[in-house]
Amino acid sequence: METIASAYVPAAPSVRGSWRQAMLALAGLIALPLVVYYLWSCVTFHGGALVLPTSQEELREWLARLPAPTLPAAAMVSCWILLQVILQIAAPGRIHAGTPLADGSRLKYPMNGWFSFCFTLVLVILATRMGWMPATLAYDHLGALLTVTNLLAFGFSFFLYWYGKSSDSLEGTSRSFLYDYFMGVSLNPRVKGFDFKFFCESRPGLIAWVLINFSFAAEQFKRHGTVTTPMLLVCAFHLLYIADYFWHEEAILTTWDIKHEKFGWMLCWGDLVWVPFTYTLQAAYLVQHPHELPWWGSLGLIVLNMTGYYLFRISNWQKHRFRKDPTALIWGKAPAYIPTTAGTKLLTSGWWGKARHVNYLGDLLMGLAWCLPCLFGSPLPYFYIIYFLILLVHRERRDHAQCLRKYGVAWEKYCARVPYRIVPGVY
Ligand code: NDP
């Protein structure tokens, strides 16, 4: 009899299916960079208004404004990547084993992200205080940096494709080059123990996110003689999120991306381009919109962000701790769980008994608190929360299908016991 689980086992794609996959990949390769350039141009030239070219002349003007790569931008990106590579290789930190792979082996990862993050922040603060570089450096070269980083991500993804194809880490390919280039061909491409996916997932993109925000704050100060409360809130909320990420870095080893996603253009470009250049849109918008907030508005935003942070942190921590020590108390009681044939247990206590992904709810509440300081003059600063809502709803469904494949009946039992996906009592 077919269970829900077996219905989710993907069949090998037909020729038509492969054609569809290739077209979808091509659409992604063209559309996603265009979206980032479009948003960049709106915030740079139109004060954040979502303006579309309405005539051929306007389109030509728009195209002429596309930023070319420059030597200083190429030098900045090269130094940046080199610094982060050196830190990942040489910075102090524990070595942690990842989750078991299909063959039972476990890869080793250096947990030195916190050191690398703090070291980089101190270095940049020192460099700006000493006058070695302006605090607005990233803002001043943003367009050229965007193009250079795009070129880097496209080029590096070719390397990943070639490297995956020519090494024994090949994870299985489709019939389509485009699809394989887009999705990747190996799960954990490495050279001499240096893990490219682990590196790109966090170090260059996440730390750049914080620093690009700071350069926007510096530009706001340069233009208006003040750093407004909304700018301070956005920078502080993002800083907290990234600091938390690096403080709990080992948690990345059990995430979907590290465990299941092959490393190709989608992740590589997402980590290097999408994250630093679209997650900073709120701060970019605020450069030209130096409004203030009433004290109760700021307080409300802090409460919203911290509520989201609490849900996100505690739910992730409950699962992480349960996986390490299944006897550790949750909310003062021994944890309840559903055993599985795969050997792991599905936690049904704490937040994991309220909805199957309360951690996503926490992330979404935080995302909302990051957008609201920009008020309601344009939808552009809300790009993050709209995109993130779509991403997490889709991600939850992918995770659901994956868990159903892995755990079968046990997952069905878990879904029956905890029927809500993300928002307890609602969805
Ligand atoms: P989760 O950390 O929620 O991990 C899901 C996995 O946890 C499942 O595949 C399963 O894996 C295991 N699991 C599921 N239910 C249970 C349970 N009841 N008990 C024990 N284990 C369970 O998902 P993600 O990796 O997607 O996200 C991690 C965090 O990162 C989230 O907080 C998310 O919001 C955030 N995030 C942020 C993004 C951003 O751009 N800011 C992007 C994406 C995610 P297993 O095989 O181990 O059983």
Image (cartoon, grey):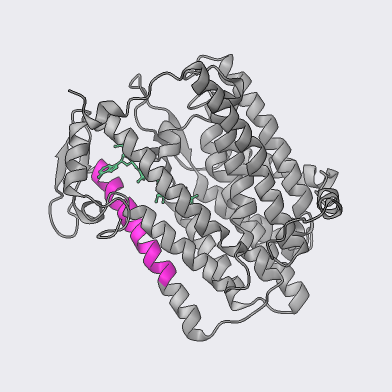
Residue at horizontal 18 percent and vertical 33 percent from the top: 409
Between 381 and 140, the one lying in front of the other is 381
- Magenta stretch, main secondary structure, is helix
Between 20 and 285, the one lying in front of the other is 20
Read off the magenta span. Answer: 304-324
Between 124 and 8, the one lying in front of the other is 8
Residue 242 coordinates in the image, percent (x, y)? 51, 55
Q: Say whether residue 40 is left or right of residue 342.
A: right
Residue 135 coordinates in the image, percent (x, y)? 73, 63
Residue at horizontal 57 percent and vertical 50 percent from the top: 206
On screen, 158 above or below 243?
A: above
For the view shown, which residue lies furthest in the front direction? 55
Residue 274 coordinates in the image, percent (x, y)? 61, 47
**Picture quadrant of residue 252:** top left
Q: Quadrant of the N terminus?
A: top left
Q: Say whether residue 358 is left or right of residue 353.
A: right
Q: Is residue 207 visible?
A: yes
On screen, 413 above or below 41?
A: above
Q: Is residue 310 magenta?
A: yes
Q: Quadrant of ligand 1?
A: top left
Q: Is residue 44 magenta?
A: no
Residue at horizontal 51 percent and vertical 36 percent from the top: 198
Q: Is residue 208 visible?
A: no
